[in-house]
């Protein structure tokens, strides 16, 4: 069971994250202050830390540095605003990823899986995901459409899985590059576009007549049940 530490002073968020991740099979501990969080990291060695940047006792950025001095544990920052300079500082200080409030548990769970994959500490694979007639099975790394197995290349499957884990949500190309190609800063949108077009062909659709893969111009793409997007 993957152990998660949630460092967050707002009890409503702390409890919601704990509940949501517990339901998804994680062992969740919480800390209401930065120093309690640091103590837990040192004593219990959780596998992932979710860290709120706005804490009452010590700034989240300072806490990242303090954790990094002692541990390589993946850190996902929780922040109230999509504030670019702060995020850059958090990532530069050693955070691995971030989520912006308000966020859903599905998104946090997907970030946790991604960060564990990237850092080579892969979590238990998730149950098969069904979207319309499409079934994506992480355990067997196979996907079927209306019962027919799809012949997907490795990156095509990874891309489909990344989208399925956040089904219904727009996923940006930058996020896909980070999750599927492990390039947080490098890589180009073109890489994503090319693989998306291959994936579309295998799903029997085109960009002009999409069914499952809905592009949102200038933003990204989301996987939907046909007819609902
Ligand atoms: Ca806070």
Image (cartoon, rainbow, N blue to C red):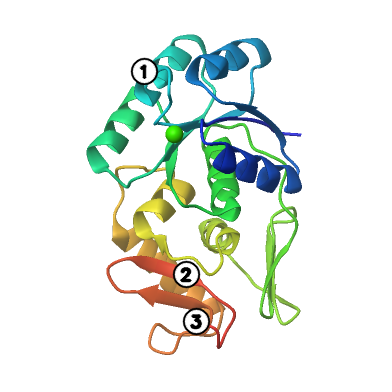
Residue marked by disc 3 = 229
Question: Mark 2 packing: few (<14 Cα in 10 Å), some, or many (20+)?
Answer: many
Mark earlier in primary sequence (2, 3) = 2
Which numbered marker is on residue 216?
none
> For the residue with label 1, is its CB less than 8 Å from the closest atom of ligand 1?
no
Residue marked by disc 1 = 62
Q: Which residue is at the front of the view, 205 or 10?
A: 10
Quadrant of the rendered structure where residue 13 is? top right
Residues at marks 3 and 1, CA–CA distance in whole angstroms: 42 Å
Above-or-below relation of 192 to 123:
below
Q: Which residue is at the front of the view, 85 or 9?
A: 9
Q: Are marks 2 and 3 in contact (CB under 8 Å)?
A: yes
Quadrant position of ligand 1: top left
Which numbered marker is on residue 222?
2
> Going by the image, does 48 lie left or right of 2?
left
> For the residue with label 2, is its CB less than 8 Å from the closest atom of ligand 1?
no
Q: Which residue is at the front of the view, 159 or 73?
A: 73
Give coordinates of residue 217: x percent, y percent. 30, 73
Give the structural element (helix, strand or loop) at label 2.
strand
Quadrant of the rendered structure where residue 113 is? top right
Give the structural element (helix, strand or loop) at label 3.
loop
Mark earlier in primary sequence (2, 1) = 1
Above-or-below relation of 93 to 134:
above
Above-or-below relation of 216 to 92:
below
Q: Are marks 2 and 1 in contact (CB under 8 Å)?
A: no
Above-or-below relation of 99 to 145:
above
x 47%, y 16%: residue: 67
x 49%, y 19%: residue: 34
């Amino acid at each position: 069971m993957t152990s998660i530490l949630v460092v967050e002073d707002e009890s409503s968020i702390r409890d919601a994250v704990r509940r949501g991740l517990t339901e998804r099979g994680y062992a969740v501990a919480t800390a209401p202050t930065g120093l309690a969080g640091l103590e837990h990291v040192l004593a219990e060695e959780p596998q992932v830390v979710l860290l709120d940047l706005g804490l009452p006792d010590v700034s989240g950025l300072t806490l990242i540095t303090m954790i990094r001095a002692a541990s390589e544990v993946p850190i996902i920052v929780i922040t109230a605003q999509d504030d670019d300079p702060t995020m850059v500082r958090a990532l530069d200080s050693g955070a691995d990823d971030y989520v912006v409030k308000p966020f859903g548990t599905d998104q946090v769970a997907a970030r946790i899986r991604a960060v564990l994959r990237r850092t080579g500490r892969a979590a238990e694979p998730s149950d098969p995901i069904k979207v319309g007639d499409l079934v994506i099975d992480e355990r067997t790394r196979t996907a079927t459409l209306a019962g027919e197995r799809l012949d997907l290349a490795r990156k095509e499957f990874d891309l489909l899985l990344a989208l399925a884990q956040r089904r219904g949500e727009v996923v940006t190309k930058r996020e896909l590059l980070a999750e599927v190609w492990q390039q947080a800063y490098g890589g180009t949108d073109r890489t994503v576009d090319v693989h998306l077009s291959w994936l579309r062909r295998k799903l029997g659709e085109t960009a002009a007549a999409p069914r499952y893969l809905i592009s949102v111009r200038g933003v990204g793409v989301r996987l939907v049940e046909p007819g609902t997007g």
